[in-house]
Amino acid sequence: MRSIPLTFLARVLSVALLSCATLPATAKTPAKVAAHPPGAAIASAHSLATEAGLDMIRKGGNAFDAAVAVSGMLSVVEPVSSGLGGGGFFLLHDAKSGRDVFVDARETAPESATPAAFLDAKGDLDRDRAQNGPWSAGIPGLPAALVHIAQKYGRLPLSTTLAPAIRIARDGFPVYARLEKGYASRRSVMERYRGTREVFLSDGDPPKVGETFRQPDLARTLELIATRGRDGFYTGETATRLLATVKEEGGRWTPAELSNYRVRERAPLRFDYRGWKVTTAPPPSSGGVALAEILQTASGWDLAKLDPAHRTHVLVEAMRRAYRDRTIYLGDPDFVKVPVSRLTSPDYAAGLRATLHPEKATPSELLPGQPAPLEDDETTHFSIIDAQGNLVSATQTVNLTYGSGLVAPGTGVLLNNEMDDFALKPGTANAFGVMGFEANAPKAGKRMLSSMTPTFMDSPGKLVVIGAPGGSRIITEVLLGMLGYDAGLSAQQVAALPRIHHQWMPDVISAEAGALDPATVRALEAMGHRVNAAESAWGNLQTVAWDKRGNTLEGGTDPRNPTGKADVLPVASAAK
């Protein structure tokens, strides 16, 4: 897809923020709206994944079957972003029962991963161990999620839903620029490991744009999952190879840790915003809590009456406070008490508003940074609606570019480096510049905190599925997308919106080039903000929406990512 000039995007963002205090989505509810979507819509970061999902719909599958196919394909064609060696979050809506469920397939810490294991001789964080090789890898969760969703929610067998991914892994796909560039940035790490060299240097040199990239070992691993389910990955041949590789490279996993991995089904987090019913990610994601805090804090201002600088100021101050709370309070709810109800309360948001000066930035160092008595871009997302009204918003990852860099020989499985998402040393920032304390400290079996924010927005007139990659910036990507939808933008306009971000520490507003005009930057600086107004573009938002009034479907895929695809399958071709 062609890129959209950022000068145009800046105007669109201005329209979105100016409009976000107009009449809410409930103001013009028609007498009659469609009962079901007129087909299926899928948006993902790669055309082969979108096509695989639509093929499952054609075969009589539902959105959940399509999700397995899309996820499996992304695990093949986006090793730079996700894969079987990683994990993810799947937000599902089952139309028949009306039930929403959050499938938590986040990786877990092995018993060996104590905080002390990640410190060097001087007591500082050993970043190489935290981000590269076997010690950086948590126990993978994505294979378990594919099996769980297929068996509990899908109609089709895994042998059908994983068939496209198996075929492309075996036959290959054309190397694209992000894959080549990502390898170049991680080459020194990836070529440490025999299994990685066997996959990525199979023809004697690194992947180049236009070459065909084949992964026969990964095809074999996918076949084992398709035929044996969980046992195709967590026990037997694949597990033996994974365990041997981790040990050979100096790490420590146990067979029990691998075989005992299970996904968790959790209740999603819900809140209201201007006539929208928002359903989103609960802990161990920080995304839903942060969205609720930011939107409810900012709702105290009529944003349409504010000039661009003051609108940005209000949003940034709300972001600052939400990310501070992320740092202090959030972690795996199976291990720590997370004050979700308090942090997402409108009363708590009112308290945060009372600390926000309308004309001056609050230095982040003045917000308490110690526990109170209360808690990269290289990820991928896809969004799905089917003709029954089933929904999937899924974000999956191996964390940083190409994860740990370590492929287990004979499996094609590239392991994640999600251990860096723990607070390995309290108060020390990770690769995304965010830090944490005891709530997110590693413990055996614990799931590291995440920013992944798969989300649904529902109003009487429109239903939206939205999400994005982007490390700690995922939350603000989704936030701006939600504001765009609330302003009446199309799915594609939402995906193309320019981006701003603040995460408490470091104390700086990040903005894509052109997202903030020079006058706005000067006004923000006069308020005391530090602004980096010329950052490279980030993120890869994928969204689909159903207009219930006109009974139409649309999809939006991020123009920053030329491999992405959003497509709609009309009801005549989609199984109901």
Image (spheres, rainbow, N blue to C red):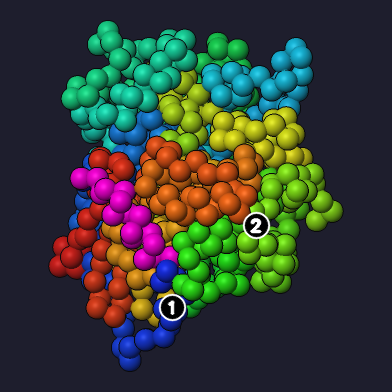
Tell me the quadrant of the picture where the C terminus can be found.
bottom left
Could you give the CA–CA distance between mark 2 and mark 1, rounded to whole angstroms?
A: 26 Å
Q: Are marks 2 and 1 in contact (CB under 8 Å)?
A: no
Residue 3 is a magenta residue: yes
From the viewer's perspective, is 147 left or right of 549? Answer: right
Residue that label 1 marks? 22
Q: Residue at x 25, y 30 (%)?
A: 176
From the viewer's perspective, is 334 left or right of 485? Answer: right
Position of 360 relative to 190 (above/below):
below
Q: Secondary structure at mark 2?
A: loop
Residue that label 2 marks? 360
Residue 317: x %, y % from top left: 61, 56
Residue 91 visible (yes or no):
no
Closer to us: 269 or 387: 269
Q: Residue at x 59, y 48 (%)?
A: 529
Residue 533: x %, y % from top left: 45, 43
Residue 250 is a magenta residue: no
What span is colored magenta in the figure?
Answer: 2-17
